[in-house]
């Protein structure tokens, strides 16, 4: 009998661990590839995603591991989808990366995404220098299109969009790699 109770206690502990860990999962998604799930940081880049051109200096923005970050599961998830990206020259030393995003809130409460986005450039975390429609809550079971603009140095080719889980104060962060390809000569 004591062995049965010990086994039952181990099973309850394992199920509890899954219940706690699963809502924090991040998933990379692309319209052309299968989702990849991870705990706090999304998986290694996978081919696929979208690219966007037509910006001032001709730099292409592509998303090698997909163009979406899904945080959470079931009725506790928030989806960040990159709709497009463009790079413009600001000064001799600075570029501006503008990302159009759609934030879809599948939770039962409004989420505030104003402080959720960042950009990792050469191991330095950068905040947006400008945002549109990220400073207002995304209502329950609805979506909001938004824009975030980041400054980065000339020569930056590989940057990472970071999204902090807006559902809690846990600090859990998902990452979405972006490639900035210079114009082809």
Image (tube, helix red, strand yellow):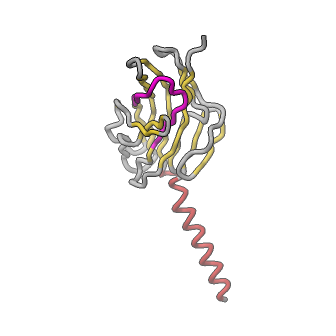
| Residue plotted at (55% across, 19% down) | 182
Q: Is residue 115 left or right of residue 183?
A: left
| Residue plotted at (49% across, 51% down) | 75
Q: Residue furthest bottom?
A: 1
| Residue plotted at (45% across, 36% down) | 119
Residue 163, placed above or below residue 19: above
Q: Residue furthest top?
A: 185
**Residues shaded magenta:** 147-163
Res 180 quadrant in image: top right
Q: Determine if residue 115 is in view.
A: yes
Residue nearest the observer in this picture, 30 or 38: 38
Q: Is residue 156 magenta?
A: yes
| Quarter of the figure that contains the N terminus | bottom right
* Image coordinates for residue 4, horizontal then vertical, percent: 67, 83
**Which is the main secondary structure of the residues drawn in magenta?**
strand
Q: Is residue 109 left or right of residue 33?
A: left
| Residue plotted at (62% across, 73% down) | 11
**How many numbered marks, from 0 up?**
0
Residue nearest the observer in this picture, 116 or 120: 120
Q: Is residue 119 magenta?
A: no
Residue 127, placed above or below residue 108: above
* Image coordinates for residue 70, horizontal then vertical, percent: 52, 43
Q: Determine if residue 147 is in view.
A: no
* Image coordinates for residue 165, horizontal then vertical, percent: 44, 48
| Quarter of the figure that contains the C terminus | top right
Q: Is residue 32 left or right of residue 58?
A: right
């Amino acid at each position: 009998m004591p062995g049965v109770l010990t086994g039952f206690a181990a099973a309850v502990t394992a199920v509890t661990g899954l219940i706690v860990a699963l809502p924090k999962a991040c998933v990379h998604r692309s319209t052309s590839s299968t989702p990849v799930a991870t705990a706090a940081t999304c998986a290694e880049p996978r081919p696929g995603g979208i690219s966007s051109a037509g910006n001032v200096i001709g730099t292409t923005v592509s998303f090698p591991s997909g163009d979406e970050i899904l945080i959470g599961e079931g009725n506790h998830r928030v989806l960040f989808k990159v709709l497009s990206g463009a790079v413009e020259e600001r000064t001799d030393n600075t570029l501006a990366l503008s990302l159009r995003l759609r934030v879809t809130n599948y939770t039962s409460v409004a989420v505030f995404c104003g402080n959720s986005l960042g950009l990792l450039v050469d191991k330095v975390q950068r905040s947006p220098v400008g945002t549109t429609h990220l400073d207002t809550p995304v209502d329950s079971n609805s979506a909001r299109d938004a824009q975030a603009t980041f400054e980065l140095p000339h020569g930056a080719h590989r940057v990472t969009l970071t999204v902090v889980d807006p559902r809690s104060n846990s600090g859990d962060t998902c990452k979405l790699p972006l490639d900035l390809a210079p114009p082809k000569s």
